[in-house]
Image (spheres, grey):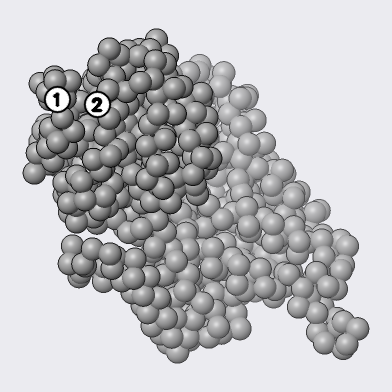
Amino acid sequence: MATETVAKPRTSVRVGVQKFGTFLSGMIMPNIGAFIAWGLITALFIEKGWFPVAELGGFGTNAEGDPNVGIVGPMVTYLLPILIAYTGGRMVYDVRGGVVGAIATMGVIAGTDAPMFIGAMIMGPLGAWTMKKIDALWDGKIRPGFEMLVNNFSAGIWGAVLALGGFYGLSWVVQRFTDGAGAVVGFLVNNGLLPLTSIFIEPAKVLFLNNAINHGVLTPLGIQQSLEQGKSILFLLEANPGPGLGILLAYMFFGRGAAKASAPGAAIIHFLGGIHEIYFPYVLMKPILILAAIGGGMTGIATMAITNSGLVAPAAPGSIIAVLAQTSRDSYVGVILAVILATAVSFLIASVILRTSKNKGEEDDLSAATSRMEAMKGKKSSVSSALTGEQAGASGAQPGTVLTRPVQNIVFACDAGMGSSAMGASVLRNKIKAAGFPDVKVTNSAIANLSDTYDVVVTHQDLTERAQPRTSSAVHYSVDNFMNSPKYEEIVELVRSSNSEGAASETGTTAAPAGDAQPTAAATSVAAGHGAHVAEPAPAVDGQATEGKGVLLRESVVLNGTATDRDAAIDEAGKLLLDRGAVDMSYVHAMHEREESVSTYMGSFLAIPHGTNDAKEHINHSAVSIIRYPEGIDWGGKQVKFVVGVAGINNEHLHILSSIAKIFTNKAQVARLEEAGTVDEVLELFGKVNS
């Protein structure tokens, strides 16, 4: 078995809250850079900033006497909410959902004077979800050639309807909610009750609801308060590194064993790196230490309230560096005091608990506590391995992540997402279906389009390092043979074991938000422009396809190639694509560039040269060329007898690649292809595979 799986029963309430919280924070966190940019511009250029500039800060009037608009106001009014809406919509229904969600949110923005962060977090996913349901009504019923027309107009019309609904209805509702939430915060501040929020915030952090609370709730409210007052205390309710630092310092002085030895390194990661989850296992080792975190959190909040301090924008991650970078010009003393005093109080309480503990002999070790943390979080990450010194993974998977959930989403990624990844995905999909798991989704994607929503990521061994940072929560497999890699059997075993064990625990728990899942391969009709796609098993030979008409034509099949080496074979395959007007010469050059970076050798005497991801703009229409070399040619040390040139737009070429994948994983079919005497025999062979 390639990797370890853990299926632990979890209450539906907590799992549901974690899912919802993760979804909320997932709309904010990818856009934190935009929030930071807005915060820096605000801190520098508004009227009370470090370097006031009327034209940028949006105060005063210009030479004609008109008020300066600046960029601070438009960013917070339009840019940030639309980014949130697009991200939320894309989480539910890819790019199409993001676009419709952004259109819908524009109505909410125009319907009120207040920044519509809450409105964006509602309209973005809502617009995408409703668009997805509408698309399902005519899925598979659109006549060939009218897909783009229907897709574009349906998105435009429905987006306009939602924008009008947001303008006349939802904007008023969200405005009332925002006003009410602001009044609650004001009541807590005015009555000195805001420190009590630590009673809920600190335990929630250990349960991995920190991002949900901070970015899902506090950040939208804090932006509103910052816009009105120039700063907000809400940005530091959860992000203050003081409480966690105090606990780690206490372990440095009064801990024992592995906990004491690892605490200094954890403190550096926590305080400077801003990775708060590093201290969660230390609390789980002795749960009563949550009192230290609560005490430190309450002290920090009280200090900021007394000194009237705050940040101008979210501090993400919760590093002291990020905190100071976003501190309001008049709040440095208060914020620094809040961090220091929170650390001191947390340290004192934790020290007393550690020194007076009567059950030291029964105290959990760090590894056990880390395991509990991973079970709650649903994955094992490099942060936890920094504590225990363990490396996740086994013989097949790359080290770094161990799944603790059933495998539901697998992606095969390559540079361009049109050739080798589609072939590999088709092979792996067939194996997983044959193993009895048809609902496990196997898609393919360009590495540039990957997101951290997959359970398993499969790449060529030369591309793994590029894919890992984009999909850190997934298990990674590296392969060098796309047709018959032994790693595929390990992945099938992982799917079998994880889903069998997962059935005993909470069902429906996957790596992606609920709305992000795509239908199974047999039922999917992927909208144009999606980053990941499924190879549709529909016959498309010699112009007989219902989709992707004319992708493989008679004149694009050569039974006896003349090339004698790899580069000449690429030129020969590219010329067939050029002759059909499918690509321009720049695409052929990109085919060579792709080959120099990562080999397109697939195994089973097959290579599928294609362009890089950047070369897609040089494709005029989808086409596939097939050349047979009976004597074989050298392809980077591998013998190749079949070269398939690929140029693909959207999904039009994927059914041909699916056919090729099925043929080249069957030795009998490969033998028939080698013996074919006419082009018609080749075309017939590909046609029968998917019939």
Mark 1 residue type: Ala
Q: Give 402 or 688, whichever is nearer the viewer.
A: 688
Residue 491: percent from the left, percent from the top? 25, 27
Q: Quadrant of the N terminus?
A: top left
Residue 12: percent from the left, percent from the top? 24, 52
Per the image, label 1 sits on a secondary structure element best described as loop
Per the image, label 2 sits on a secondary structure element best described as loop
Q: Is residue 636 left or right of residue 244?
A: left
Q: CA distance from mark 2 to mark 1?
A: 8 Å
Q: Residue furthest top?
A: 637
Residue 374, quarter of picture: top left
Q: Give 59 or 354, whichever is nearer the viewer.
A: 59
Question: Cβ–Cβ below 8 Å for labels 2 and 1?
Answer: yes
Give neighbour class at mark 2: few <14, some 14-19, many 20+ (Cα, 10 Å).
some
Residue 543: percent from the left, percent from the top? 21, 50
User: Mark 2 highlights which residue?
Assistant: 559
User: Mark 1 highlights which residue?
Assistant: 676
Q: Give 572 or 521, whichever is nearer the viewer.
A: 572
Q: Give 66 or 379, whichever is nearer the viewer.
A: 66
Residue at the image point whose x is 86% and y is 83% from the top: 61
